[in-house]
Image: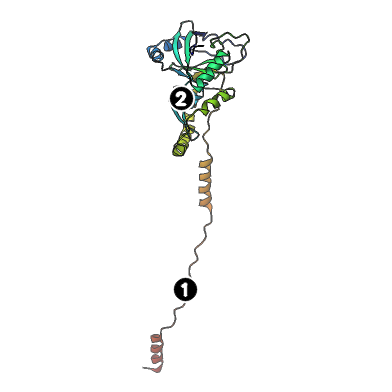
Amino acid sequence: MTNETEIIRYNLKDRGRKYRGTPRNFDIPAIVKAINSGATQEKVKHRDMYGYYGHWPRVKFGMNPSEGGVVDGKQVAIEPAMVTTYLKAFDDGTIEHRAEFFDTNAGKLAQTLFKRKAGGFSSAIDELKPEFFGFDYVLEPNFSTNRGYEISLDGVANGIILDDVAISDYNQQLIGVFKLLDSLNTEHEQALSVVARLQQENEHYLSLLSSNRLGNVSLDSLESIVPMVVPKDSARKFLDEAKSFHAAELAKIAEPIKEAAPPDSNDKMAEKFARRGY
């Protein structure tokens, strides 16, 4: 089997699901225009539209992930699973695309699932711009019709909707993600520990700023991510200690007892003469 799929077709108006997943109300003309735009087609032409095993890389590093970053104090390299080699959208909402799987751990895993007719493709779309970022391979695509093969049963799909980074739980992809993480570069851990700590703090604050934006981004599978919360323990502890210090009774300083100076011999002699009338 070649590493490249046949042309895959699905329609934005038909998720192929009755009970599972999230209905999508895309602005179809806008998305069609974005997909067929010169910028998107140039990206496809130059093989720059990468896809990943699961949406984890986009969730962690953004919709257009760089080559890697720091995760839990470790430098990791993002490993693409595939690249989109053909992409076209039609006015009725039909989208055609073709993918080529890479000979990477992530790519082999995605291709194996594809060969065995498991999982499917999930789009990553920013609906506000709109902008199309490509496809990832997930276990349960929200659009069950976006698989590239026929399924005989009403497939239950639990897809992340990078079709709305409101993503649910990606537990069902953990095995694949762990395989991917096993291949990542973890060198220079000590040198990166300080940077990692600062980045984690920064991510907490950025999560607050981005919480309103994430609802506009669509990841087309049925997974989700729990929003991060800024920890307040450190700040609260500092304030409590400051209040405690302010209210504390400080120990008083004892003043030294002044001892009487020994009598001066000259003074005694002067007193003696005075008594004798000299």
Does any portion of residue 273 appear in the rendered image? yes
Viewer-side residue, 106 vs 251: 106
Numbered disc 2: secondary structure: loop
Do tag 2 and tag 1 residues touch (Cβ < 8 Å)?
Answer: no
Query: Which of the two discs, 2 and 1, sits closer to the camera?
Result: 2
Horizontal and vertical percent position of residue 265: 40, 86
Q: Which residue sits at x=43%, y=26%?
A: 67
Horizontal and vertical percent position of residue 241: 52, 48
Horizontal and vertical percent position of residue 98: 47, 11
Q: In this view, does 270 lie to the left or right of 149?
A: left
Question: Against 191, is 95 above or below?
Answer: above
Quadrant containing the C terminus in the rendered view: bottom left
Numbered tag placed on residue 274 in the rendering? none
CA distance for labels 2 and 1: 75 Å
Residue type, label 1: Lys
Residue type, label 2: Gly
Q: Mark 2 — residue?
A: 62
Numbered disc 1: secondary structure: loop
Viewer-side residue, 185 vs 259: 185
Q: Which residue sits at x=46%, y=24%?
A: 62
The quadrant in which residue 120 appears is top right
- Work out which residue is located at the far left of the displayed protein and give it: 278
Horizontal and vertical percent position of residue 117: 58, 13
Question: Against 239, is 169 above or below?
Answer: above
Q: Mark 1 — residue?
A: 258
Please report whichever mark, 2 or 1, sits nearer to the chain's N-terminal start.
Answer: 2
Does any portion of residue 27 appear in the rendered image? no
